[in-house]
Each structure stands twice: as C-alpha cells, then as structure tokens.
Amino acid sequence: MIAEADPQGLGATYWFEAHPSAAPYSVTIRFSGTRIPVDGEPRTDDSFERIERVDGITAGMGRIAVTTRAQGIRSGTWRVTATPVVQIGTQTGTTGTAPKPAALPRTVTTAATRLAPLVRGPGVRPFVWPALVGLGTVVAITVQAALLARANLDVAAAVMISMVASMVGFLGAKFYYLALHRRHPRHFVTAGTCIQGFLLGAIGTLTVAAAVFGLPAGAFLDATTPGLFFAMAIGRPGCFFGGCCAGRPTNSRWALWSSDRRLGIRRYPVQLVEAAVALLLGVATLALVLAVNPPVGGAVFAGAVATYTFIRQLLFPLRADPRTPRGRGLTIAVSTAVIIAAVAVSAAA
C-alpha cells in the first residue's frame, strides 16, 4: 500500500505573520518530531530534528508558511514540535531602528507520514503541472496541424513527429534538470524539468524528423511556433502552482503568495509573467504565419525562440535561483544576435 511504501516522509508546517513595521529580520525554526506510540526500545528513525531558517523578512510580506520535510523515518503518526526564534540584525545593512518583532509561539501538532515524493507544503498542487502541460501539448499539436493543413503539408506525418518530439523533449527536460542541479540519474523520476532541455530535445527531433520525412524544415518549424508558445502559456502556470521556478520573496505590490515547496510567502510571480510572454509570442507568431507568409522558412521560429530566451534572461534576477551574470550576459548577447539576424534575413528576402 502507498501508506506503507518506502521511502516514507513527513511534512510539518509552521505559520506566522510578518511584523508590519520591523526592520528586516530572520526567523529560525527547530522542528522536533517523535513517532507515537513508540513500541519497545526507541530507534533512530522514531524521531527527527530539522532546522529551517527564513532570512530577509520585511513588513508587507504577510502570512508566511515554513515547511520542513523529514524522510527516512518510520511510517505512522508523529507529534511535531516547532520552536521559533526571532533574530534581529542578521541582515547586512539592517539598522534595527524599527520596532522589534514579538516572540513567536511554540506549536505542537500531529501529522501522518506518506510517500516521501508526495510530501509538499501549503499552496503546492503537484498534479496541476502535468494536467496543464498535457493540455498545452494537445493545443500545440492542434494549432500546428491546422497551420500545416493550410500550407498543404503532410499533417499525419507532422503530428506523429510532434508527439515523438514531445516525448524526447520531456526526457531532455529531465536530464537537463539533473545536469543543472548535479543530481544522480537515479533521481530521474522525482527530478524536476527545465524548459531549456525540452526545447533542445523537441526542436532537435523536429528538425531531424522533418528531413527524414521530406518536410521543409523551415516551414515546418514556423508552423510549429505558435502552438509551441501557446503550450508554454498554458503549462507555465503549472510551475506556479507546483512550487518550482519560484520568484524571490518580496513585499512588492505585484507580489503573489506562492510556495517553493519549503517557504510559502509573497513572491514575484515570474512563472505567470513568462506565461504572459509566451502567450503574446504565440499570438504574434500566429499572425505572422497567417498574414505575412514568411519569405524565409524558419525565421519566425528562430526569432520567436530568441525573443523568449532574451526576455527570460531579464526575468532571472527576480527568481529565487538566479543565474550567474556572466552566463546571462552571454545568452542575452546570442539571443540579440539571432533576433537581428532573423529580422535582417526576412527583410532582405
């Protein structure tokens, strides 16, 4: 049964309100868990202790949820004690002139274990992501098929190619995530995905398969572009609800409450901004393919992907896991060159 399958895990959450007028401060929470009841002599997996720290808490961040996840423990019911400690003056540049936050209360709760990969914090809905990605894939292939039929290309072959490309792209997204986060391949099933890996795998497959089936690669890719971005516009909010690619905590008026599976707090909604960008690119490229009849095959595809990549790099500083400035700068430069080349080639044709 799932309730007893290994590995077992347990999630415990501590909620508190950010002080409305304090200088930036930190909260450290010690979670101590004990399995109840303990039969016979206590074992090492009958208890656990975890320390979770939240830095940079400021006024306006509202309600905050800190979740710890314990794995490798015995299944059953646990009593978990959360003991918070407020720390003042731990942030660089803090003046400490604002009122000191009041001490936070200690809490005791009970929770039951479950299959470890299913342990998530508040606000995380892991099944939304695959549902939205699946819907996006259907929309992408439908739009692509309609545009290919309009261009009198082999729709059946294109749909088959796209389905295979989607599967290869999914594998690419998984392996890209493993490589980026330096995770062992044994974590493949529970690992996240990266859009860069999906694009590399899917686009490579589309290009090679188009040549094998005798389809004009440029026209094929251009017809695929609107659906590709509509799919990302539909699927990207799944990351927002799934707790991945989260934005940085902030008290900005544009912030939305969301979680990175550990910390639920007001954040920059970068996943939703990316979805909006993808939607605009989908509409723009659809208009180009329908109205302009691109003179150079593949120019719409190259320009749109480069534009998306360019904007994505601008959003990275708002993410909780920003990329290095050097890597971002190089990617922005390459993306800009591709955009200029796509426009120049189309204009000269």
Image (spheres, rainbow, N blue to C red):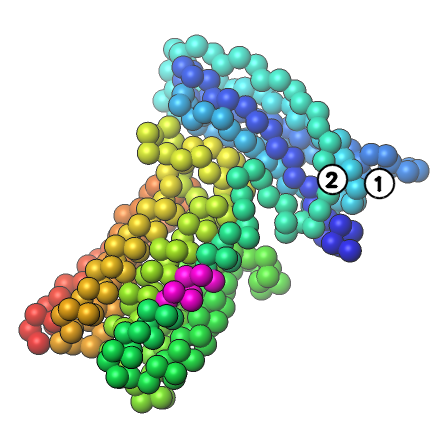
Residue 38 is left or right of residue 273, and the answer is right
Residue occupying the far left of the picture: 348
Residue carrying label 2? 112
288 vs 4: above or below: below
User: Where, quadrant-wise, is the C terminus in this rendering?
Assistant: bottom left
Mark 2 crowdedness (10 Å alpha carbons): few <14, some 14-19, many ≥20: some
Using the rendered view, name the quadrant where residue 20 is placed.
top left
237 vs 168: above or below: above
Residue at the (79%, 45%) spot, across then down: 74
| Residue stretch rendered in magenta on the structure | 134-140
Residue at the (54%, 23%) spot, across then down: 16
Residue carrying label 1? 43
Q: Position of residue 276 (x, y in %)?
A: 31, 50
Residue 272 is left or right of residue 300, and the answer is right
Q: Does the magenta-highlighted stretch encompass residue 255? A: no
Residue at the (42%, 56%) spot, across then down: 235
Residue 265 is left or right of residue 196, and the answer is right
Q: Amino acid at mark 1?
A: Arg
